Amino acid sequence: MSSQTVKQLQDPPSAGLAHNSALDVLNGSFADSAHLDDLQRSLDDARCSQVQLEQHLVESEKEVDILTINTRIEAILQQDKAKELASLRDSLEDDLAYLSHDLISTLSPTGDDNAPTLLEEIETMHRALKELESVRSYVAVVERTLQLSEWSSSQMRNSTSPITTAATSKYQALLAFVNDARHSCSLVEDIGNSHGSLTLISFLERICDKTWGDMKAILFSTLISASENLKWPTAVDYVAASKEDRTTFESAVSDLLKLQEIGESLHPPRETEGLYPLQALIHPVALRFKYHFDSERETNRLDRPEWYFTHIINVAHDHRPFMEGVMQRLIHGSNFQGVNAWHNYTTLLLPVLERKLKHSVPVLLTRPALLAHTVYQSLIFDSTLRDMGYEFVVQDNQEAHDERREAEQGGISKVILEQKDWFKTWLEGEKKFADDQYHEIISASDAWVVADDDRHEYAQNHAARDADLKATTSARRIKALVEQVTDRYSPLPSFRQRTQFLVHVQLPILELYHSRISSSLDAFETLSSALVRAVPGALGVDGPKTDGRKLTGGVEGSQRLCKALLSARYIENAMRTWGEEVFFLELLGEINLRASLRVTTGSHSSFPERNARDNDGATTSDGTIFEELVTQYAKLSARAEDMLVQQICGECEGSLKSHFSALSTHMQDPDDSTVEVAVPSTLLPGVALLSSHLAFLRSTLPASVVTRLYRRTASRISEHVLQRLVLFRPSLTRGSARSGLTRTQARVVQAECELWTESSQVAMNTSHTRIEKPWSRLLAAGRLLGADLQQHEKLLSTLFGGKNDGWEELLDNVTGLGCGGLGMDEVKTVLRLRDDCRR
């Protein structure tokens, strides 16, 4: 209880609180005058209660006084005791300082002539003794281990064939001794001193491994000596060898197989370890390889990696009959019946190549061409071994964060490709080579020349997509370059490596070519703009030196646009075909499934977005890996087509200005008796210009594209001529005093309309019906003007009599095209142009 609480309890009672409490009691008990009779009784009870409370108060005050006195006495006693303890602490500190002064160590820097104390000398000697005892124990353990190791080797050297477990008794004793030492050291580790024991155990384990290796080497030498009698490492004619040589060889093989069986019972099995006899046979092969390719002989050339790759392939091929015939039979007589001798032998050959590559590749990092050649040869080597039936062992050592195993195929190429720095250097070299090739293609003098020397090959590969599509030289070479890049990285063993090659090398080529075509269209639009032609020097174009009309006008201008269109369409169709190939479909599927690959492609704008997953977690794959680029090239092709239509229509409409201007002068009515009508000469330049454009398009572009462009171009020109020549023809007045076309003038207009279709028919060389379709509105108007209205009075009555039924059938009798797309009001307008139509 705190002093503040005690003080509050000692305070006298509050009169105000008592008055308020009494007032609350009176208000609650006596609400009205009817309860005043109980007031006296309540007052008596209150007095009795007051007397009792006062008695309790007196008793409490007495007890508080007694407790206060006792507490003060106890506090005084404790204070005296604290003073005594403080004094005792001071005396102890003085004694400790005196004793410390007498025990100053030689290690103390406070004095120059301090001598070690006896205690320190004893402790130092004790530590030295313990260290000497530890060293003695370690030396004894090492001495015993080395002794057992020597005995094990001697025992194996003196043993005779066949090898039995007894020939390894000394080695088993060595293992038992090392296990005992390991157990003793584990007890020391529990105490806390583990550094020295760990070093000792690792040293003893190395001795055991070396001893076992020496024991193998003893039997290896026996087998190698026996194999030399069989002309190993050349191709072995086992049947031609003597019986004694074969018996010696088979005995050496059996001894090694037996030793390996014993070793597996003594050691944990090693997955990557080959059969001991095959390991022994590899030694002469490795020595010959080193002699040819790791020395200063002419065969050791960095620019000829195919030589040592071919050497290993030849070794594996030449020794295959011996492995599958002789060695496999000997292995079947042991506990390793499930081992394929040739496969295991080939696996043991690969480390020879790995060492060679690890030694030579760092020198090639500054020579990209040789590095790329070496990588390519390693991929060919892997492919050749797979074709021979060898399956590379894939190590399951992928990062845990990857949701799927990254390595799909093993191979000697992984020695280079799995090194990030080496792979990055190779990738940069391939990208530089591809970029140089691209710029060489674009900068060539014939880059934009339209050539069709490969149309037969293209038609075979693209039968369903514009089989008659021509291409520019640059488009064909870009396609070949992209396919060459695909051939370079398609053999890569990892999808991660393939994705990086796709994103960093292949897609940029297609993007650059797209940008090049797009920029050429931008330049064409700039040169052909009205502002450049009207204001020399506008938009950065130097007027005196640049003639925009020559570059963008006439068939030459259409030719430039066709080159861009053919280039874009050619690459677009090629990408559609590539996207449907199995290689790219598998690559896209893996990218959609793996988060690590999606990170690589996520920041690339030309890569399609990840496909959505369905409820079962499967990934839909409606698109292809080039889907986004195909869309961009399709837009580029559509833009080129739009510009072609605009180019042709603009020039034709411009050439018709003089013709339409001549219509503003009132036409002189020729003799009505004249049968033949002459087309105005002002119309011929426009018709000839359209014919030349169409003829060029038909000879250059695919039929489907030409048909689409023709329909758009003819429809626009037809509508333009219809508006200017017929519907809103100048020099004609309307109303009650209108002056219309005579029959002969109307026939001239009809002849002009028919001339457009006839010239298009000649240029396009196709059916008349397909030619007339885009011109139907103009033809219908022209034929309606040139018709004999007296023979079609029923048509006039139907149109102008308020009847809306059957007029199209009657109009078809006149035009042969039905209404041709003309509305009823337009038909009435055309008929009213005739001066003999008074409706």
Image: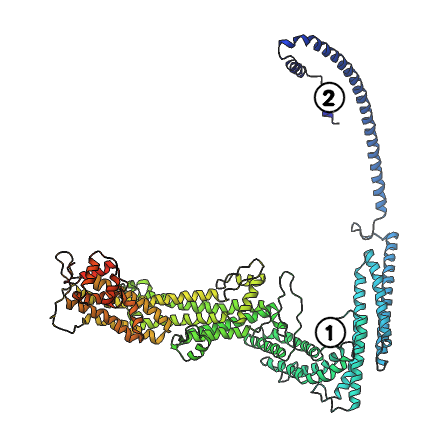
Where's the N terminus, which quadrant?
A: top right
Q: Using residue 228 as the reference point, say whether residue 486 is left or right of it.
A: left
User: Foreground: 765 or 795?
Assistant: 795
User: Foreground: 546 or 38?
Assistant: 38
Label placed on residue 273: 1
Give the x, y percent position of residue 542. Answer: 31, 67
User: Foreground: 521 or 254?
Assistant: 254
CA neighbours of label 2 inside 10 A, class few (<14), some (14 to 19), many (20+) = few
The image's colour scheme reads rainbow
Q: Give the SS element for disc 2.
A: helix
Q: Amino acid at mark 1?
A: Glu
Where's the C terminus, which quadrant?
A: bottom left
Which residue shows up at 57% across the image and 63% down it? 597
**First in sequence: mark 1 vs mark 2:** 2
Specify whether residue 545 is in view.
no
Q: Tell how many labels.
A: 2
Q: Amino acid at mark 2?
A: Leu
- Mark 1 → mark 2, Cα distance in angstroms: 91 Å
Which residue shows up at 71% across the image and 22% down it? 8
Label placed on residue 9: 2
Give the x, y percent position of residue 111. Answer: 80, 50
Give the x, y percent position of residue 168. Answer: 85, 75
User: Foreground: 6 or 25?
Assistant: 25
